[in-house]
Amino acid sequence: MVSVAEMSEITSPTVVNQTAPMPNPANPKVERGMIEIEQLDFAYGTNKVLHDINLSIPARAVTAFIGPSGCGKTTLLRCLNRMNDLIDSARITQGSIRIEGVDINASSVDVVDLRRRVGMVFQKSNPFPKSIYDNVAYGLRIAGTTKRTLIDEAVEKSLRSAALWDEVKDRLHVSGYGLSGGQQQRLCIARALAVEPEIVLMDEPCSALDPIATAKVEELIRQLKEQYTIVIVTHNMQQAGRCSDHTAFFYLGRLIEFDDTTKIFSNPGQRQTEEYITGRFG
Amino acid sequence: MTATASNSRRVHLVQGILFWIFRLATYFVLACATYIFLDIGIKGSRTVFTSTPPFINVPFLTEPPQTLYVFDYEGKKMALSDRQFRQWKVEHPGTEVEASSIAYSAGGIWPCIVGTALLVIGSMILALGIGISSAIYLSEYSRNGPLIRLVRIAILNLAGVPSIVFGLFGFGLFVIFFGWNVSLIAGWFTLGLMVLPAIITASEESLRAVPQGLREGSLALGASKWQTIRKNVLPYAMPGILTSSILGIARVAGETAPIMFTAAYAMKDELPWQVTRMTDFFFQGVMALPYHIYVVSSKIPQNEYTERVQYGSAFVFLFLVMLIALTSIILRERSRSRLSW
Ligand SMILES: Nc1ncnc2c1ncn2[C@@H]1O[C@H](COP(=O)(O)OP(=O)(O)OP(=O)(O)O)[C@@H](O)[C@H]1O
Ligand SMILES: [Mg+2]
């Protein structure tokens, strides 16, 4: 442990450590599902909420975003699949985000294709008012899959991965609204997995779940990282500790620290990080 | 002590009086409505129903209006329709009778029912098509700039324009300027324009009521904006849009002013589909129930023979509007339960 006195010497918050080395943009070492955020500034109108974010999210690993409420975790997450395009006042004022080496905000990028590759589970679960089956099949049908057997297979596979199959297999054709809050959230996860994205963004996926459902989702996240790059926002320190490989701590729109989860939780480099994870503020 | 007591008594008194005023206002409305429905119901059913099977006055519903001839013959008072009168004259050659003729008071109202149905269908298709499209643009695509605010204000104002003004506008633009003459298509556009503001406003509200999370969820799965609207927004807004169009239908079916210069004929012998060319269908005037009621109530001298058609038409008219409303409600409930919203 670093003593508090030593840490207080660091006055301005800076990024201390980056696990993945920044690739040279001219010759990026491209890996499937990797995300590089460079000097990103973001504002809602005149309200600047993200300042100079530099972050490389490694592929096929779980990265947790932690930080006090309002520090910009959701905003950053929504930048990664350009969900903020929907908000009129929202602007990236500086910097870039590259996924697999490609700047996702370039005019040549097809945002529809980007969103298919970068799936998202929202902070507030949002099942569609359709049957469970149709919820999961939605993305496939949108993409033009019409073959019934293919859709059937994908629905079962996704529901199994989301640990929901056994609970709903007998009522696939009843409305998703009839499920409990936790089941609805897992339905949303299944829906996102059905289109087989490369990256899955999860915004507090467990905030409405009981400990049992939470354990199921965490188990799921650990399995998913074999195939997917996962970014998860969480307010639950134990959860970040249990299921993430890397942790990014944000405070007031700045990235304070990014490191291996074990390092962040055992030996954080910044005083603010330590205070936050030990519950002294936030 | 006494001051508070008298104060509370006064509060009670004021409250009591006010409640009675509200109550009386409600009773007044109820009494008026009951009177209108009973009057039309009782007098109208004398025309529409018969005391012998099939108990419905089928000719009234299936025949065109005819002139009624009334005369005395061998001490009997005869009231014959145009056709019957001509036949009667053939059967009684040589007899000269002093017959008084009363326009439209014999026969039925079938062409008026057909005309009103055609006007409603055409104008609602137009209004829903244009209305839903512009509501989609306003709520899903447009950014809320000053221009859009101006458009919204214009739509609101349009909703307050009296129907006679729409009638004159339609007359000036469609009938005269476009040269469509008095025709179905001129009526469609005029009526469609009249209900458009209500339909845009209601459609926009229904679209906005669809939670933003459903749009985001759909977009996040790689759906395009239009796919999202078509698959995950519009279906849920549809029940609300349909509900609001109930009122639109009733208004389109019921207004006389917009069609009297643009689409309605007082009398027309052929039915709308009895045209030689397809295009003539759109450019012909039609009879319409509300206009017919207006004509038989104010354009012909009134006497005891005119009441039959007046009340009969009003009765059928009310019944049809109620039927439309009921259908829309059932439709809406159906789509709602399918959504299990
Ligand atoms: N649509 C928006 N328009 C304007 N400002 C916004 C919008 N969404 C978020 N903000 C602001 O941006 C800042 C960051 O919000 P954000 O939702 O990213 O925080 P968060 O870290 O996800 O918080 P929480 O943990 O509570 O979810 C906040 O100050 C918030 O008020
Ligand atoms: Mg958030």
Image (cartoon, coloured by chain):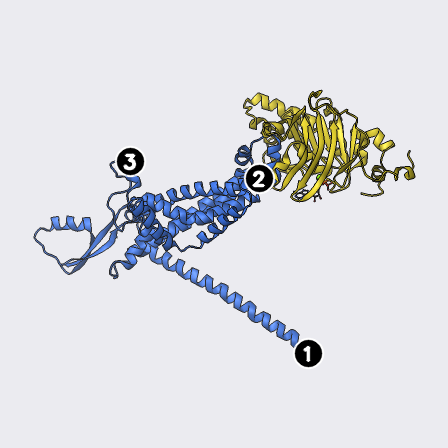
Secondary structure found at label 2? loop
Secondary structure found at label 1? helix
Mark 1 falls within which chain?
B
Chain that is yellow in the image: A
**Amino acid, disc 1:** Ala
**Same chain for the residues at labels 3 and 2, yes or no?**
yes
Residue pointed to by mark 3: B278
> What color was chain B assigned in the picture?
blue
Whether residue A157 is visible here, answered yes or no, is yes
Above or below residue A90? Residue A107 is: above
Mark 2 falls within which chain?
B
Q: Position of residue A29 (x, y in %)?
A: 71, 20
Q: Position of residue B35 (x, y in %)?
A: 41, 62
**Pointers 3 and 2 in contact (CB under 8 A)?**
no
The label on residue B194 is none
Relative to residue A9, is residue B223 drawn left or right?
left
Q: Front-most of B164 and B26?
A: B164
The label on residue B340 is 2
The label on residue B3 is 1
**Amino acid, disc 2:** Ser
Disc 1 Cβ-to-ligand 1 distance below 8 Å: no
